[in-house]
Amino acid sequence: MAHRCPSALKTQKNMERIKLTKREKDVLRTLQTKGSDGLSMFDKPAVRTLAEKGLVDAMFEEGGGVVDSKLSDMGIEYLRDYPDLKDPVNWTKIGVWVSAIIGFCGLIATIIGILVACSLINNH
């Protein structure tokens, strides 16, 4: 007996990027181009995860196997908005790295300033 797993999330405009594994990206591309016939048995866990994220509508067997799957409305919109399937940018991490680099440059400038000042003092 199979049951249908509806999309977890409603479609929305200006959808944000979703972090996806390489396998999940491959499954989305396969469903887009070949449909569920192009999936292998190794793609079944990714189909379940994508269904939980709302990108795929899937029908599952009692034992957990996938009977059928297709892109959900949200999955179609997501692929239209982000055809390259790049992961979201974590601006917090980037900000930390930029701050660290600026701080390091400031430290180097301070050390150079001290060395220049010391050499000027020793020359006089």
Image (spheres, rainbow, N blue to C red):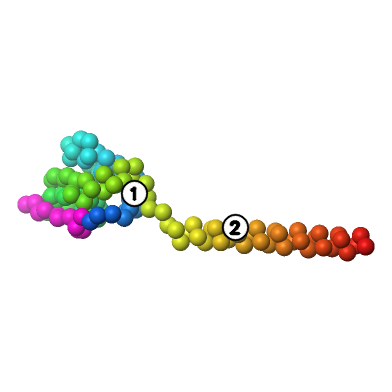
- How far across and how far down the image is residue 35, in percent? 18, 38
Label 2 amino acid? Answer: Ile
Q: Which residue is drawn at 22% across and 36% down?
A: 33
Residue 21 is one of the magenta-drawn residues: no
Give the residue furthest to the left.
1
Give the image quarter of residue 111: bottom right
Main SS, magenta residues: loop
Q: Could you tell me the amino acid type at mark 1? A: Thr
Viewer-nearest residue: 68 or 98: 98
Q: Is residue 5 magenta?
A: yes
Instruction: Give the residue number, with chain letter if any, for mark 1.
Output: 21
- In this view, the residue in front, 53 or 73, is 73
For the residues labelled 1 and 2, the Cα–Cα distance comes to 30 Å
Residue 78 spot, x, y in % from top left: 26, 48
Say which of 27 and 55 sits in front: 55
Badge 2 crowding class, 10 Å Cα cut-off, few under 14, some 14 to 19, many 20 or more, is few
Percent position (x, y) of residue 120? 87, 61
Is residue 39 something that shows in the picture?
no
The residue shown at (48%, 59%) is: 93
Q: Which residue is drawn at 28% across and 54% down?
A: 14
- Residue 9's x, y, as percent? 21, 58
Q: In this view, does 50 lie to the left or right of 103?
A: left
Tell me the element at label 1. Answer: loop
Q: Residue 6 carries which label?
A: none
Examine the rendering and report whether any part of residue 28 can be seen: yes
* Magenta-tinted stretch: 1-11
User: What residue lies at 21% left-to-right and 51% top-to-bottom?
Assistant: 74
Question: Closer to the N terminus: mark 1 or mark 2?
Answer: 1
Residue located beneath label 2 in the image = 101
